[in-house]
């Protein structure tokens, strides 16, 4: 065997042995390597922060701002008492301003959410809350003629511990130049289309729908704004039963409607409740349809 052949043979053996060890070692290394799956990312759900709206008024010569405000529990229009000292101070200052500026009015907007239940006499819970604030202001000496109320849907409002903090806003402005004309138009509207409540036989209470509640709110608004205005509430029955019993039933129906107006913040002495019993039918008592129409309470303005 020549030197060249021997050299080539040695090189071949070296390559074969090297390849063998390379494959063996890499296979063992590969077997020793384990792949670790990345840990699943933990999803943290962050609770939204509760909202809190301040009692803030800035305009028409009056400025006051405090983080405290009127607060309400979920689905309630009752103000949580007591009010804070800071809020009481702001309300007192507002009263003094309105007394000195009779052409000014305060607009109270009550907030509510679509998830809340409305068990009040008002078309929406926001208006009920605004009305509760109006009643609180009136108890402190405010003139209701200088208070406007409205409700506003505020679904971005978030409660804390079952309470909406500051579920109202306030705006001070000059009395509208058309305010008197608006009241006259409201009076004509109520007189032309009074609120009529119909009752089941022998019943003296019902559940008002949204349209009926709006009429109650309109009547309440007019009585609030016109100092000498009064409301007439007259209960009627069909001819079933004794006349004396029906007279009492008609009065019960009138008192039910009167209580609804009182819940709207109207003073009891501005509401005249009476009964006509079965004496003023508007339909034939010989038919069920006619009797149903006669079982009614009519609420209008005097």
Image (tube, rainbow, N blue to C red):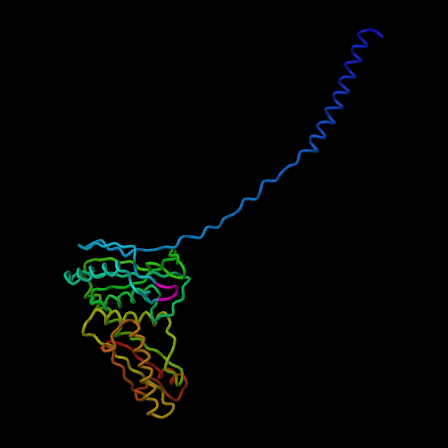
In the image, residue 273 above or below residue 75 = below
**Image quadrant assignment for residue 83:** bottom left
Residue 227 rendering spot, x and y as whole percentages: 19, 72
At x 25% / y 80%, what residue is drawn? 272
Residue 201 rendering spot, x and y as whole percentages: 40, 85
**Image quadrant assignment for residue 191:** bottom left
At x 37% / y 88%, what residue is drawn? 285
At x 35% / y 90%, what residue is drawn? 245
Residue 223 vs residue 47, the one in the foreground: 47
Q: Say which quadrant the N terminus sits in.
A: top right
Residue 47 vs residue 261, the one in the foreground: 47
Q: Residue furthest left?
A: 100
From which residue to which does the magenta span run? 72-76
Q: Say which quadrant the C terminus sits in.
A: bottom left
Is the stretch drawn in magenta largely helix, strand or loop?
A: loop
**Image quadrant assignment for residue 197:** bottom left
Q: Would residue 241 be counted in the magenta stretch? A: no
Residue 287 vs residue 119, the one in the foreground: 119
């Amino acid at each position: 065997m020549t030197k060249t052949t021997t050299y080539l043979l040695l090189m071949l053996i070296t390559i074969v042995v090297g390849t063998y060890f390379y494959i063996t070692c890499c296979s063992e290394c590969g077997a020793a390597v384990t792949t670790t799956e990345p840990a699943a990312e933990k999803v943290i759900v962050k609770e939204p922060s509760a909202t809190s709206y301040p009692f803030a008024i800035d305009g028409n010569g009056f400025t006051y701002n405090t983080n405290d405000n009127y607060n309400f529990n979920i689905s309630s229009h009752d103000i949580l008492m007591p009010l804070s000292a800071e809020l009481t101070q702001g309300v007192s200052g507002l009263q003094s301003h309105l007394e000195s500026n009779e052409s000014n009015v305060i607009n109270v907007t009550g907030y509510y959410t679509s998830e809340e239940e409305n068990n009040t006499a008002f078309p929406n819970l926001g208006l009920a809350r605004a009305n509760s604030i109006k009643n609180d202001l009136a108890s402190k000496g405010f003139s209701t003629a200088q208070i406007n109320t409205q409700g506003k849907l505020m679904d971005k409002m978030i409660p804390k511990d079952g309470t909406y903090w500051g579920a109202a806003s306030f705006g001070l402005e000059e009395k509208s130049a058309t305010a008197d004309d608006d009241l006259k138009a409201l009076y004509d509207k109520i007189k032309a289309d009074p609120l009529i409540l119909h009752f089941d036989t022998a019943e003296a209470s019902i559940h008002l729908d949204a349209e009926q509640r709006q009429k109650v709110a309109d009547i309440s608004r007019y009585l609030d704004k016109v100092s000498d205005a009064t409301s007439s509430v007259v209960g009627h029955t069909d001819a079933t039963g004794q006349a004396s019993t029906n007279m009492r039933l008609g009065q019960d129906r009138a008192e039910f409607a009167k209580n609804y107006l009182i819940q709207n913040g109207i003073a009891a002495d501005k509401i005249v409740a009476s009964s006509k019993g079965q004496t003023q039918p508007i339909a034939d008592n010989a038919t069920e349809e006619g009797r149903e129409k006669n079982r009614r309470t009519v609420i209008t303005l005097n």
